[in-house]
Image (cartoon, rainbow, N blue to C red):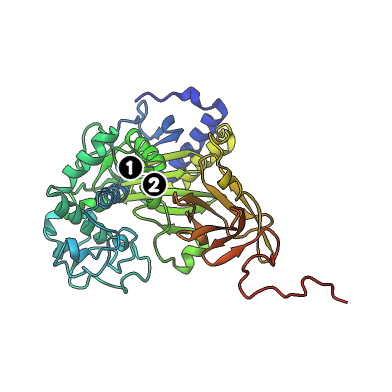
């Protein structure tokens, strides 16, 4: 892969290089490699290394740990989109006999199934997967630690179950399905379950001395869907572009957007920290922007994939050390550097191709009681409702083709908007999930719930 470095300004490239240089030096990483994606393609690649005369490029494999979970989640969403399962289905319906079958597919994806964080000892990341040949070996005697669906509790065994679900419904090994349904369509030719040269070696760095210790490289066996994969910044840049925009060969933009939507009960600390989890994707609020993606770690390796969807910028950062640089912070900073130095250029405004007078009649100012709202008809043929002053409930609506509209987000998600018309066809009021919106505050000609005082508006004297 050739990275067109001229796509970013020299000052931006230097700021990116400076950030990863600080991370590698202060984090004492044997090597650190990064890439930035904008507009769906790689626009920058950088690397820092402790080895003189050689720096890893975008083709060198690193172990990516739990970023593997996002790949597994995409496979499950494909099964949903094909109608082979519903996210609300209990696991037992498709994969019987696990002992935790009451948990739904969505709860497993969102880490809210109540499962333990890890498999029973010995620690699965530093021991052969052959020690856990069956699902029962991964789950142990007490797999549930919390009530199903009540709290977010990150679970590696939960993604082992999802990998087994994929194998059950596809009738093929998880990695074979992964290659045929994600890696090959997206061109991720340097992503694999086992390391392929050139690849980095995994190291532990002594916490009190500048000394190294090689880490073991284990085949995770049954735990593979939770963290087995090796990949490169080049491949993960392509994967980041897919997670931002979708690709109908793999998963639609709408389904990818669903993965990026919060789907799990939040802990109080998560609310304070501005972090939550979707369907196989981590979400966080940082520097006033929403970032989505996933982090990963296994002995000897750290990995991070961060996407600023609104900024159309993504970052991939990989290092070959067990601990050290905080790659989540590095990834977020790389996104911020590009987004602030070279803000996204918006698409040109374009008018509607056709104007439907019946829809145009809905545009303008409306009142819910005394709250003033504006309703706009957007160029994509949808309606956008929002408060005229301050913060308040806002949403976009899609047409149902029968004169009604369905809310797409926020408080009004799934709610029905019905324009109510007079005998002459003019719009009397809007009914939005039983809320009555009128052209004037408490319009006496509209069926305002509770009625309107017949003496009307008055002063205080």
Question: Which residue is pictured at 41% across the width and 40% down the height?
Answer: 245
Q: Which quadrant of the figure has residue 379?
A: top right
Indicate which disc residue 254 carries.
2
The residue where tag 1 is placed is 320
Crowd around label 1: few <14 · some 14–19 · many ≥20 (10 Å): many
Is residue 128 visible in the rendered structure shown here?
A: no
Q: Is residue 39 above or below residue 438?
A: above
- Residue 376, image x and y in percent? 60, 47
Q: Secondary structure at mark 1?
A: loop
Residue for point 64% across, 65% down: 446
Report how far apart the C-alphas of labels 2 and 1 lie in the structure: 35 Å
- N-term-proximal mark, 2 vs 1: 2
Closer-to-camera residue (359/71)? 359
Residue projecting furthest to the right: 461
**Whole-percent x, y for residue 416 in the image:** 48, 60
Label 2: element kind: helix
- CB contact under 8 Å: marks 2 and 1: no
Q: Is residue 147 above or below residue 371?
A: below
Front residue of 137/30: it is 137
């Amino acid at each position: 892969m050739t990275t067109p470095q001229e796509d970013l300004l020299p000052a931006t490239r230097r700021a990116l290089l400076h950030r990863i240089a600080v991370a590698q030096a202060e984090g004492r990483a044997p090597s650190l490699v990064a890439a930035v994606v904008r507009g769906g393609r790689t626009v920058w690649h950088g690397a820092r290394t402790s080895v003189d005369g050689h720096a890893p490029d975008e083709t060198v494999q690193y172990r990516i740990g739990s970023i593997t979970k996002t790949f597994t989640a995409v496979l499950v969403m494909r099964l949903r989109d094909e109608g082979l399962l519903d996210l609300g289905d209990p696991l037992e319906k498709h994969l019987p006999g696990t002992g935790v079958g009451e948990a739904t597919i969505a709860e497993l994806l969102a880490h809210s199934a109540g499962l333990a964080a890890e498999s029973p000892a010995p620690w699965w990341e530093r021991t052969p997967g052959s020690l856990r040949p069956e699902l029962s070996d991964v789950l142990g005697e007490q797999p549930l630690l919390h009530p199903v669906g009540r709290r977010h509790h990150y679970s590696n065994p939960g993604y082992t179950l999802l990998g087994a679900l994929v194998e059950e419904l596809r009738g093929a090994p998880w990695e074979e399905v992964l290659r045929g349904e994600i890696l090959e369509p997206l061109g991720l030719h340097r992503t694999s379950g086992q390391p392929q040269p050139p690849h980095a070696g995994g190291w532990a760095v002594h916490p009190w001395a500048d000394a190294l210790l090689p880490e073991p490289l284990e085949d995770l066996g049954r735990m593979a869907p939770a963290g087995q994969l090796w990949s490169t910044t080049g491949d993960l840049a392509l994967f980041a572009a897919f997670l931002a925009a979708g690709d109908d060969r793999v998963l639609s933009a709408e389904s990818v957007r669903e993965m990026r939507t919060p789907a799990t009960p939040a802990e109080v600390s998560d609310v304070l920290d501005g972090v939550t989890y979707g369907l196989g994707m981590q979400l966080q609020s940082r520097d006033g922007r929403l970032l989505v993606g996933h982090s990963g770690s296994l002995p000897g390796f750290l990995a991070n994939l961060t996407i600023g969807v609104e900024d159309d910028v993504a970052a991939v950062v990989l290092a070959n050390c067990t601990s050290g640089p905080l790659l989540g912070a590095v990834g977020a900073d790389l996104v911020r550097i590009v987004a602030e130095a070279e803000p996204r250029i918006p698409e040109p405004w374009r008018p509607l191709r056709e104007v439907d007078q019946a829809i145009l009649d809905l545009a303008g100012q409306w009142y819910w009681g005394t709250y003033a709202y504006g309703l706009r008809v957007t160029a994509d043929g949808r309606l956008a409702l929002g408060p005229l002053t301050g913060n308040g409930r806002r949403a976009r609506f899609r047409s149902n083709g029968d004169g009604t509209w369905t809310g797409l987000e926020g408080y009004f998600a799934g709610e029905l908007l019905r324009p109510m018309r007079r005998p002459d066809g003019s719009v009397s009021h809007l009914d939005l999930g039983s809320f009555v919106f009128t052209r004037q505050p408490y319009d006496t000609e509209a069926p305002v719930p509770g009625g309107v005082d017949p003496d009307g508006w008055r002063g205080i004297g």
